[in-house]
Amino acid sequence: MSLSRRKFLQYSAMTSAGLLAPATTLAANNLQSSLNWLIKRMRSEGTISPSERTAWSVYDFNAQKKLVSINERQSMQAASMIKVFVALAYFALHSQYPNQYPYSWEERKVMERMLVKSSNTATNKVMEWCGGPQRVQQLCQQVTNWQFKHLHIVEYIPQGGKTYRNRASAQDYSRFYYYLWNNSLPQSYELKRILSIPNHDRIRTEQMPAYDITIYNKTGSTGMLCGDGGIVQFGHGQNFCYSFIGIIERTSKARNYGRWIRARSRAMREASELVYYYMSERYYALGYTPSVNPNSFSDGFNDSNGFNGSNNGLFNGGSAEIHWN
């Protein structure tokens, strides 16, 4: 489970310079400072434009601690990342009224097309089942006791996928994935099953081996936004996991969408790789040796990780938010 030599030397140089802390003494502010350094470097190189806003969030489920909170409470365009909330809304209805809102083979396929293939047609169908966009937002808030402070769902996905009015914050996604991993959402196991189906995510890199990592995520893409949010589970048999949220937003539509989204996707993967480097080094340095048995994976969440259902600092913002980006 090694990084490329180029990246390893780069991060090692940062550690020597004091920009990265040794894994055994890793603290939230060190990872946040290092990620901020990386984003500033990307801006200086033109990978991220000065006019583009970014938001980032990392939560360590094992340590029960927020490690990164950068512009986390900023309301930003949601694009297809909103689809996890659409799924949540329907599962809330299904849990309460299973006969009126069934979840059979047909509904399952629609849900998979929405979350895995990112089908806008499927998304609009699920929204219709729920009673429309505003009803989707209301259901999400009711089932979580109004924990999504910046969630704003007001439109179906327009033809061509040019959806700019639905909004959420990195904190909203962080809370969603916290609830999901803690099995506190309706149909959490089914949601995790679907979100773990491989897709073109912006979290995994070539340095994150498939046999050792499972990613639960949903991306979002328009000519004005590049985003991804999800859970990274690594070390089979040990259940080390963390959530990673990254959002890059433009103020105007990119002239060359393909070139812009590819460049921002690379930037997001580099940020994800930095976080993965920290997390893997942190737990290996503490003496844990995750199994590499690809058949030992369990998508369940158990008490051995020390969760008791409390918010553990997540719902009050975790570490202090710093608007560096």
Image (cartoon, rainbow, N blue to C red):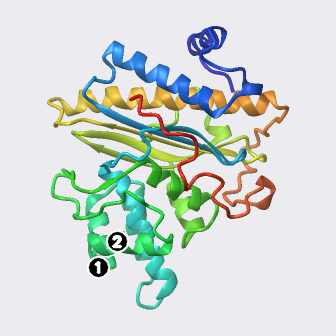
**Three-letter code, disc 1:** Gly
Seen in the picture, residue 123 relative to 45 is either above or below; the reply is: below
Horizontal and vertical percent for residue 132?
26, 74
Query: Which numbered marker is on residue 136?
Result: 2
In the rendered image, the residue lying farthest to the right is: 287
Seen in the picture, residue 84 relative to 216 is either above or below; the reply is: below
The reply to whether residue 104 is visible in this rendering is: no
Asked if marks 1 and 2 touch (Cβ < 8 Å), the reply is yes
Of residues 11 and 27, the one drawn nearer to the viewer in this rendering: 27
Tell me the residue that label 1 is attached to.
Answer: 131
The reply to whether residue 60 is visible in this rendering is: yes
Query: Which numbered marker is on residue 218?
Result: none
At 26% from the left and 67% from the top, the residue drawn is 124
Residue 291 quadrant: top right
Which secondary structure lies at badge 1? Answer: loop
At 41% from the left and 63% from the top, the residue drawn is 85
Of residues 167 and 98, the one drawn nearer to the viewer in this rendering: 167
